[in-house]
Image (spheres, helix red, strand yellow):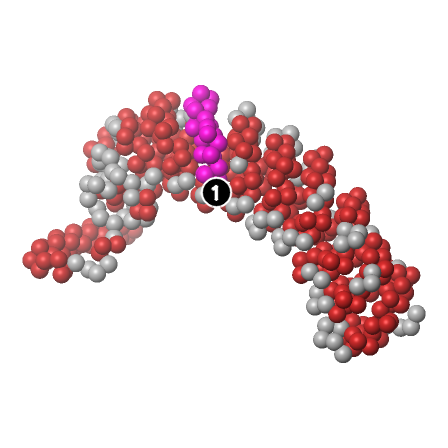
Amino acid sequence: MEDDSTANEEFLARFQELLRTEDQSSEDSENSSQNHGDYSVAPDAQFSTSLNQNTIWAWHGLRNAGSLPGTNGQHNVKSYPAFSLSDPDTQETGMDYSDKIKSIQPCQIIGMALEFSGSWFLRNVLAENNPESTNIIFDGLIPHIFNLAVHPSGSNVLITLTQACNTDQLSQIICNLILPSSIIIRVSRNVTGSKTIRRLIQLLKRSCFINPVVTALAEGFHVLMQDQHGAFVIHWCLAQLGSKQNEVLYREAIRTCVTLATHERGCVELNSFINNISGPCRDLLLDTITDNTVFLSQDPKGNFVIQHILDLQHPVFTKKICISLQGYYIRLSVQKCGSHVVERCLKSSEMRFAVADLVNSKRLSLVAHDQFGNYVIQTALKVTKDKDRLLYGYLRKALEPILESLASHLHGKNLTKLIKDAPPM
């Protein structure tokens, strides 16, 4: 034990000597700068965070609290009257966090919340569950809810505050976040804000405040579903809340599904939404989408939504899609987007509608020679051969007159080989 104590004392002595050396080096550097003019300044000095009274990094408690200057400098928040977390006088008297917070000016609190060591201090104060201290912090932060929600350190203080405050204070926080609804929508589209809202939903999901929050999100449903971070919030609601709480989101999905289906990001998020939605609203959503089957099947993004519904193998909506496309299969087969939908229809339980269109069409030769259509015919031959030999026979018979021309065509060689390699009927 004595050896350990001696080693610790030696370590502290060396550490203090190192700090004195750094301070002396800083003084020598300043004197050198004054003697040699501006040319002594390092080339990248203009990009460094200046520690002066006009920036938050001048706050006395930063170095002792373990924060590195410049860590959160991207916000360039102006400083407030200085307050040290490591004042020797307060350490000697044993003052606790609640006593310290009383000596802080209200205007200092938001600056502290947006800085790592300051946010750590505020969270420790809130953890003591002292109503007087909580009120002081609440009064200092309530006008700055948006800034807190989108800031890495501030968001932690905000979540801790929602857990420590009373019902009336929580109501004010929620109101400042959702009135107007554009505030929570902007927060949700921010990378940090998205995480903050999800944590807030987790905390509020069994309270009376969750419904106003979800309603505010629903007002920006279309915008959120087209944004990566915003969509995370919507999907989090689906995962954490019940069907009744999410009903307002379901209604917005039904109202905006066609527009979302044609959006690059929206079509992906809509497919995920379809997977997670539950209850009668799911069928209403699928019904609304499949009402627009012909339009979406030809859209560069919408076709992915139709394919996804076919992959669900829902008998009602699979049949509805396949019937809706009757008379359009030939046109879709020679389109890059539409050909994928036709292939999905051929692989479904209702493939007969697509095969009938192909067999009875006078433009079957056009499809078979097309760069996309030949893949459709190949798929039709493969699935009918395995599942319906009668349809397979009709399709082969329809292709026989054009086999010779296919054999010498760039896009028909594989199709010809597929037919010749098959056993005779």
Main SS of the magenta part reads helix
**Residue found farthest to the bottom:** 408
At x 70%, y 57%, the residue is 338
| The quadrant where residue 142 appears | top left
Task: Please give left or right for residue 146 compared with residue 376 in the image.
Answer: left
**Magenta segment includes 272:** no
Which quadrant would the C terminus be assigned to in this image?
Answer: bottom right
Residue 285 spot, x, y in % from top left: 69, 39
**Magenta segment includes 182:** yes
**Residue found farthest to the front:** 362
Residue 382 spot, x, y in % from top left: 81, 65
At x 58%, y 37%, the residue is 237
Task: Please give left or right for residue 392 compared with residue 203 in the image.
Answer: right
Whether residue 169 is situated above or below residue 377 in the rendered picture: above
Whether residue 230 is situated above or below residue 141 in the rendered picture: below
Q: Which residue is mark 1?
A: 189
On the question of residue 375 being in view, the answer is: no
At x 30%, y 36%, the residue is 111
Highlighted magenta segment, given as a residue range: 166-189
On the question of residue 425 being in view, the answer is: yes
At x 78%, y 45%, the residue is 320
Residue 133 spot, x, y in % from top left: 34, 25
71 and 411: which one is in front?
411
